[in-house]
Amino acid sequence: MILINSLDFGYSKHKVFENLNLTFDEGKIYGLLGLNGAGKSTLLYLMGGLLFADNGKVEFNGFDMRERNPRALADLFFVPEEFELPDVKFETYIKLHAPFYPNFSRETLDRCLSGFGMDTSCRLNRLSMGQKKKAFMCFALAANTGLLIMDEPTNGLDIPSKSQFRQVVSSCMTDERTIIISTHQVRDVENLIDHITIINDKQIVFNRSVADITDRLVFTDARFGQRPEGAIYAQPSSVGEQVVMPRGGEQETPLNIELLFNAVLAEREKVATIFA
Amino acid sequence: MDFKESKPIYLQIVDRICNEIVTGKYPENERIPSVREYAAIVEVNANTVVRSYDFLQSGDVIFNRRGIGYFVSEGAIEKITAMRRESFMNEQLAEFFDEIDMLRIPIETIVELYKKRNKQ
Amino acid sequence: MNDFFNLKRFLLVLRRELCLSTKPLIIGTALIVGLLVLNFAGLCKVFDVNYIGVNKRGTIDGLMVFLGLLTFVATIAVWVSSAQISHNLARKTNFLAFSTLPASTFERYLARVVVFGILPLVVWFALYFGVHLSDAVVDYTEMNDRYQGGFIALCACVILFSTVFAFWGAAFRRHGFIIGFCVAAFSIFALFRWILPNVSLMFLDPIGRFVQHDYFSYGRLRLVLAVALLIIGAINIGAGYFFYRRKQMIVKSVKRQ
């Protein structure tokens, strides 16, 4: 479990987070969203011990991440947006790195790789960008860490791979694991995540489970001029408008993450009152 | 699996499983995939599939054997058909009636067209 | 399971560093070996020469300076290697991969020190002293006292400035090498001035005069050098470690700290 308490963080020129409080629980897949430059990657780096907070604490399983305690790191895996893999065979890479992760499972690795249609016979730096991502992600999942952080995981994956990504991640999830996915490509992870956290303007502006959201909000289409009363937010679409409304007794609708995101950013107070 | 805009995801999954039962992919008294296995197949979060399974359980379409998994109930196909009938009556039929009223098509015209269709 | 240092884990980190750095290591080693072998070839008895820059007739000639330079360059290779201890961690991608490795900061730092600092030194010294086993090269014992002192000074410089580079590299990343190199280059000129008193390097004269007045006997020199080496080396390496601990990611080309 990750606990972020009264976090302050900033660079000399500008502050990124101010008095941020956040927790991440086990057994959930979190989607971390925010505008460009809102600080998603920064927050992930703070959780991974790559950046240190100015004030406040970032705790993972009771370890202060500032200490970079190896036991904490052995239960954490970070898949960044960009990374380089060394010029070795995949098998060599596994041999060198797997022992650091006590829960590493070779069986999981092979299963995930075959989910992507790959195996370990490749030479890592000769792979294309997408292939590298897939290989590294499989290693990350096979490490079986309690916390898995992925920054833009579907960026660079071709269309069939996005589907494979969902399958592979879904099949590797357990009740003890926490997965945090930071992304702009919300469609790629739409049905995978079960909790949405939105960062904006140094704060958490939204932090709810998907079950909660679909319980209290509906996302529908409306024709122009027929916007329902009580609609919190609307944006143009091909049939007219896409609308976010508080749910009455009607049936739930699937969550439209893009619509939710825009609604939260545009009408933060209105959304907050619905979830109060 | 591609998801439509209208129905909640968990209900769309319910439909999918029901189709698979009706077409014989999961025969009665046979085991269906676990929550996680099914979540991976349709690429959704396991919690969503839990809702689907709960829904099917409450409709007596599947049952759970602790420690073993979920199984298709006896007479599931009939139950599914009954479920779908009810759902059709409550939703699509109501919508249909609203529509023909709005367009002012008398019900007799509908019956005529139906009889003509069946003759062909 | 010690959080600060665990031997098993440390060996894993070491193995990783070695395997992933084979290319630069091989190149670096080949460079050092190649240059020193050339140097030795020149110093063979065949050419009737002595060790550090002065032949038996007591005068300097072009060949000697050239061979001295070769030693110098081999030494530089060792120092460059020391600077590599933290250098390529300036890049975000490398930093990330390295820092999320489940090992303590000390283990990671030590592994890099061993691979990039100690290993090249071992190669350098192994060659110098190993070659003595063969009869073809002028022996340390054949040198007179003065040159022995100079030789020890040279060895001391190699080790000492390795640690300097290791530290400044960690502290200043990109600029570390330049700063360290200037410090080292200045000192090595001072050393050569000391060894080659007849060469007139006006601006370094005070140092030469200091030696010529025999304020230090060479026995004492060795002791002083050994102690200075240990202290300054330890300080450098230790300081490097503390800088390492505080190191954070560079994000958006804005430096932390």
Image (cartoon, grey):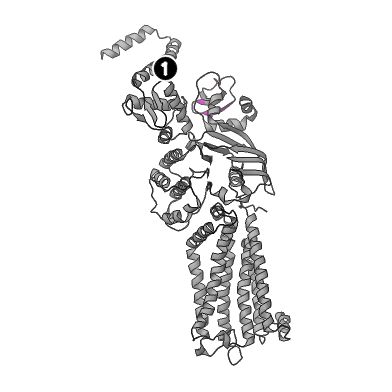
Depicted A106 relative to depicted C110: above or below? above
**Image location of residue B67, percent across then percent down:** 41, 32
**Image location of residue A87, percent across then percent down:** 45, 58
Residue A227 in magenta? yes
Please give the name of the residue rendered at 65% of the width and 58% of the height, measured from the top-left corner.
C243
**Image location of residue C99, percent across then percent down:** 57, 53
Depicted A195 relative to depicted B100: above or below? below
Residue tagged by mark 1? Answer: B87
Please give the name of the residue rendered at 57% of the width and 58% of the height, measured from the top-left corner.
C107
Quadrant for the C terminus of chain A, please: top right
Q: Which residues are magenta?
A: A224-240
**Furthest residue toward bottom:** C57
Out of A177 and B94, give the one closest to the viewer.
A177
Q: Is B32 displayed left or right of A259 in the figure?
A: left
Specify the subunit that label 1 lies on.
B
Which kind of residue does numbered mark 1 sit on? Answer: Ser
Q: Is B19 displayed left or right of A272 in the figure?
A: left
Q: Is C216 displayed left or right of A32 in the figure?
A: right
